[in-house]
Structures are given as structure tokens and as C-alpha cells.
Image (cartoon, rainbow, N blue to C red):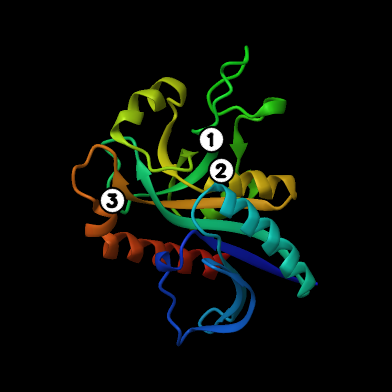
Amino acid sequence: MKKITLFIFAEQTEINLDSKTNILNQVLYQYKQISLSIYTNLVFQKDYALLICGVGKTNASFALTNAIWKLKEAGFCVTNIINIGPVGSSKKENKITQTFLIDKAYFFDVDLRAIEGYKLGQLPDNEYEFQTSKNLNSKLKQFLNLEFSNILSADRFFAFNDIKTIEINFSSTSLLDMEVCSLIKVANSLNIEIAAIKVVSDNLFATENYYLTRMNDWKKQVLEVFLATLKEI
């Protein structure tokens, strides 16, 4: 089987591929907003898989699990999974386009604290922290000069009112999204190395919707990170 890296984005609008240098070879799967394709980058002479997983934890879990088996059926063995995309921030000092490697992820909207001994974000069987691959992170750090950060995932938009809950229960966490914790959980369950690179696109302290007003800026950074990673990985 041919080894391949799988890149994951939540939405197609998050990644602007140059169609002259990224040639679409095959669409393996497509269902509503979810799609899985094989591309060749002519500049780096590399094949890679691209998954658009859709928004939310359920879409992410389904899309990644399905993608691994679709790729296997097509003769590909996924050796690395890399999720790239925009995130919100719960820290005022995090600037738009600032980019982080994810260390650990947590579920924000899992709450079993009515049962004695459970913490916010903790699933049954003591699952609480979801760790990205230290080996893959080490490889990425060699060419991406990025700080590590932890992240929370929830099936809703975060709001300013969430900041206090985040500070009390997840003091080492400042990034916020809707997919990555589920992606890490699935990858770890399948024993496939996973890393996540996140670009700040909005901030809970801001009144301006930077996701929209600074879209060109964060999308440019997402593309630069993707190309730098594709070149070296």
C-alpha cells in the first residue's frame, strides 16, 4: 500500500488550493459538505489526501473514520493526519493569524459532573485529555517555529460568557473550535499519528467579527502553513 499524509479542513472555504499546482487525481468520497480527494502537488512532487470533514464533532468523527477506510480500499495507508484551520481564542493577547501547534484537546460541552468524580469535559472510562502525536509534533517543530497550545471543542460557538468557565476548568487552554478533539480521539483510537495546526481567526474579547473582516489574512496564513507542512512532511 502507498503511504500518504491526510490533511483535514473543516470547510472547503478554509483552503484556497492553486489548481495549477495542485492537481485533483481522484475523488474517493463525497456526501453533502464532506469530501475526500487525492491530489498531487506539482511543485513538491507529492501526493496527498485532502478531507473536508464538515463542521462539528459528529461530522468530524464520521468523516475521518470513513476516510481511513476509503483510503485503505483505494490502496493508501495513512501515516500522518494533520488538521489545519481557523480557531477562536479566549485570551485577549492572542492576535489574529497567530498560529499554534496543538498539544492537548478537551471537550467543552461534555458535562457528567452530576456523577461524583467527573470533571467538566470528561467522558466515561476516564477519558479527559486527548493528546496529539508527540513524534509528529516534534517533526513539525523542526520547520514550523510555533508555540504549543491546548484547545477546547464544542458543538456550538463559544461566547464571552464562557471565559470564566474556561479559566476555572481549563486554565491551560486558550483555543476554541468545533472539531479537533473528535479528530484526535478517532486518530488515537485507530493508532494513527495526528497533529493539529491552528490559526487564530477571532477572539471572544473582540466586538468585531474578525473571522469575516480578517478572512483574507487568516486564510493566507492557513495556506502558508499548509504548503510549508506539505513540503517538509
Q: Is residue 231 left or right of residue 38?
A: left
Q: Which mark is residue 27?
A: none
- Few, some or many C-alpha atoms within 10 Å of disc 3 (few <14, some 14-19, many ≥20)? many
Say left or right for 120 vs 85.
Answer: right
User: The residue tagged with tag 3: helix, strand or loop?
Assistant: loop
Using the rendered view, name the quadrant where residue 233 is placed. Answer: bottom right
> Which of marks 3 and 1 precedes in the sequence?
3
For label 1, count other residues whose C-alpha is less than 10 Å away and answer few (under 14), some (14-19) or many (20+): many
Q: Which residue is mark 2?
A: 181
Residue displayed at 52% across by 51% down: 196
Q: Is residue 50 above or below residue 94?
A: below
Kindly identify the amino acid type of the residue bearing the numbered disc 3: Ile
Q: Secondary structure at mark 2?
A: helix
Q: Residue at x 40, y 62 (%)?
A: 222
Reading the image, the residue beneath label 1 is 107
Residue 142 x/y as whole percent: 52, 54
Specify the amino acid type for callout 2.
Cys
Residue at 34% across, 36% down: 90
Q: Which marked residue is nearer to the observer: mark 1 or mark 3?
A: 1
Query: Circle 3 sits on which residue?
Result: 96
Closer to the chain start, of discs 1 and 2, is: 1
Q: CA distance from mark 1 to mark 2?
A: 7 Å
Badge 1 amino acid: Phe
2 or 3: tag closer to the N-terminus: 3
Residue at the farthest top position: 116
- Secondary structure of the residue carrying tag 1 is strand
